[in-house]
Image (tube, grey):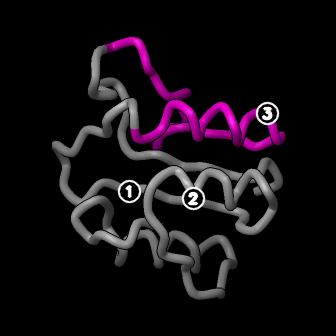
Amino acid sequence: ESVEAGHCNHTVQKKVAEAIGITNDPVRIDSQAKYGLVAAGGAALYLRIPSHLNKKEKIWDHAAGCIVVEEAGGVVTDMDGKLLDFCSGESMNSNRGVIVSNGKI
């Protein structure tokens, strides 16, 4: 998960991880290194649950990492299970948050 609390909701992300059986402490790193960690098998999941309801992600924070994870067999969606929309301008206005999985979760 992101180091910066303003980028995501650490409390909610912890509850989600616990609900699906993840008990390890989160790895807090920034940039698209989180995507690389999931793609390489160093993490099963990367959650980016918005810190507030109106938070919209920027495409440059996710586009390249999304391709890397998908090519490694992972899955990247928003919180509603929709694929990320990189065609609606610089902000991903039709998506809520980001969920990156290694494809096994």
Q: Of callouts 1 and 3, which one flags the residue occurring earlier in the amino acid sequence?
A: 1
Q: For mark 2, what is the residue?
A: 34
Q: For mark 3, what is the residue?
A: 71
Q: Is residue 53 magenta?
A: no
**Measured Cα–Cα span from mark 2 to mark 1:** 14 Å
Q: For mark 1, what is the residue?
A: 49
Q: Is residue 64 magenta?
A: yes
Kindly report which numbered mark, 2 or 1, lies closer to the viewer in this rendering. Answer: 2
Q: In what element is the residue under mark 1?
A: loop
Residue sitting at x 43%, y 56%: 48
**Measured Cα–Cα span from mark 3 to mark 2:** 15 Å
In this picture, residue 24 sits left or right of residue 5: right
Instruction: Name the kind of residue labelled 1 in the image.
Output: Ile
| Residue 42: x %, y % from top left | 76, 68
Q: Which mark is residue 62?
A: none
Q: In what element is the residue under mark 3?
A: helix
Q: In what element is the residue under mark 2?
A: helix
Instruction: Name the kind of residue labelled 2 in the image.
Output: Lys
| Residue 15: x %, y % from top left | 47, 77
